[in-house]
Amino acid sequence: MRGSVEHSWGWGHCAPSPLLLLTLLLFAAPFGLLGEKTRQLLEFDSTNVSDTAAKPPGTPYPPYSLADFSWNNITDSLDPATLSATFQGHPMNDPTRTFANGSLAFRVQAFSRSSRPAQPPRLLHTADTCQLEVALVGASPRGNRSLFGLEVATLGQGPDCPSMQEQHSIDDEYAPAVFQLDRLLWGSLPSGFAQWRPVAYSQKPGGRESALPCQASPLHPALAYPLPQSPIVRAFFGSQNNFCAFNLTFGASTGPGYWDQHYLSWSMLLGVGFPPVDGLSPLVLGIMAVALGAPGLMLLVGGLVLLLYHKKYSEYQSIN
């Protein structure tokens, strides 16, 4: 399976990226490579939480360990035409039948050129990037207003964790009402990156009315996590590595939520080198041109009117 994926997707461009390996092997590939307590789907009861910035965002339920999930055969979902594959699974032991009609899915997609997906948040991608989309569909929440999250672990660079940055913009054409981009960078001249809009969606297709806030906790070293028993990880990074972890939580106690349609999706972009930089969209550039050009046009018209008025007045000759 690994051979066919590497051949079809051309992982030669993406292989050096720590986040790519995280996504494919530790995050997207749900094999419990970091041990059963590391890869987890989190759930919180936010019924009695009024502070949307509260951490944790509610009373935690026992988490779902991805090591205890049963997953589909990846070869069944491998699509060479779209350079994508989907891991879909559910808990092997589900006495309450929470996932009787539901699943957790990780869709990984590579790209052959620069463009944007059709669905929000429409992250700009290039040929050296890959996208990970996480979707929780049809699972029964354990509370009336459950919030979900993910525990994410990644390789650190030496003793340090990757740096987390926030970028703000006035442009929200591609992700309405979202003016921020979160980013992880490995090194000052980044050898790898991950970036995402802090937004998830409770409906498909996603839109402004179904947007959920996405909160990321600070990165912290996870020295107690054992090295994944993966020959690919060892081949790229050796046998001595430090891991860092952080949590992502989706939604708030008020507004739309997973409880609306039992649907939740979120996506991130990852790759090697410097991340793609969003320029201002044509719509925003047009608005700025009008906003900045209108005063100048008014001054020009006003100057012409004064000039013509002065000329007309100077040509008038009184009769005495």
Image: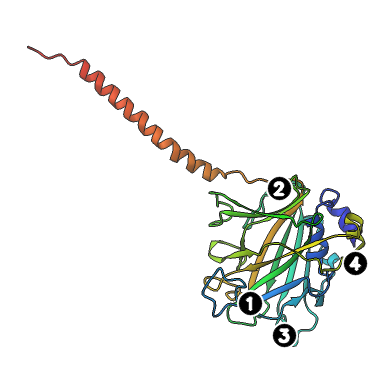
Residue 116: x and y in percent read 66, 51
Q: Nearer the viewer, mark 2 or mark 3?
A: 2
First in residue order: circle 2 vs circle 3: 3
**Label 2 – label 3 distance at C-alpha:** 41 Å
**Label 4 – label 2 distance at C-alpha:** 29 Å
Residue under label 1, please give it.
44
Which of the 4 image quarters holds residue 239? Answer: bottom right
Residue 252: x and y in percent read 56, 70
On the rendered structure, is 155 left or right of 260?
A: right
First in residue order: circle 3 vs circle 1: 1
Q: Nearer the viewer, mark 4 or mark 2?
A: 4
**Label 1 – label 4 distance at C-alpha:** 31 Å
Label 4 sits on a secondary structure element that is: loop
Q: Nearer the viewer, mark 3 or mark 1?
A: 1
First in residue order: circle 2 vs circle 1: 1
| Image point (67%, 70%), residue name | 149
Mark number displayed over residue 97: 3
Which colour scheme appears in the figure? rainbow
**Label 2 – label 1 distance at C-alpha:** 33 Å
Q: Amino acid at mark 1?
A: Phe
Given contact means CB atoms under 8 Å apart, are the residues at marks 4 and 2 in contact?
no
Which of the pair 15/51 is nearer the observer?
51
Label 2 sits on a secondary structure element that is: loop
Q: Residues within 10 Å of mark 3 (few under 14, many from 20)?
A: few
Which of the pair 237/288 is nearer the observer?
237
Which of the 4 image quarters holds residue 318? Answer: top left
Residue under label 4, please give it.
229
Which of the 4 image quarters holds residue 260? Answer: bottom right
Q: Amino acid at mark 2?
A: Pro
| Image point (75%, 73%), residue name | 40
**Label 3 – label 1 distance at C-alpha:** 18 Å
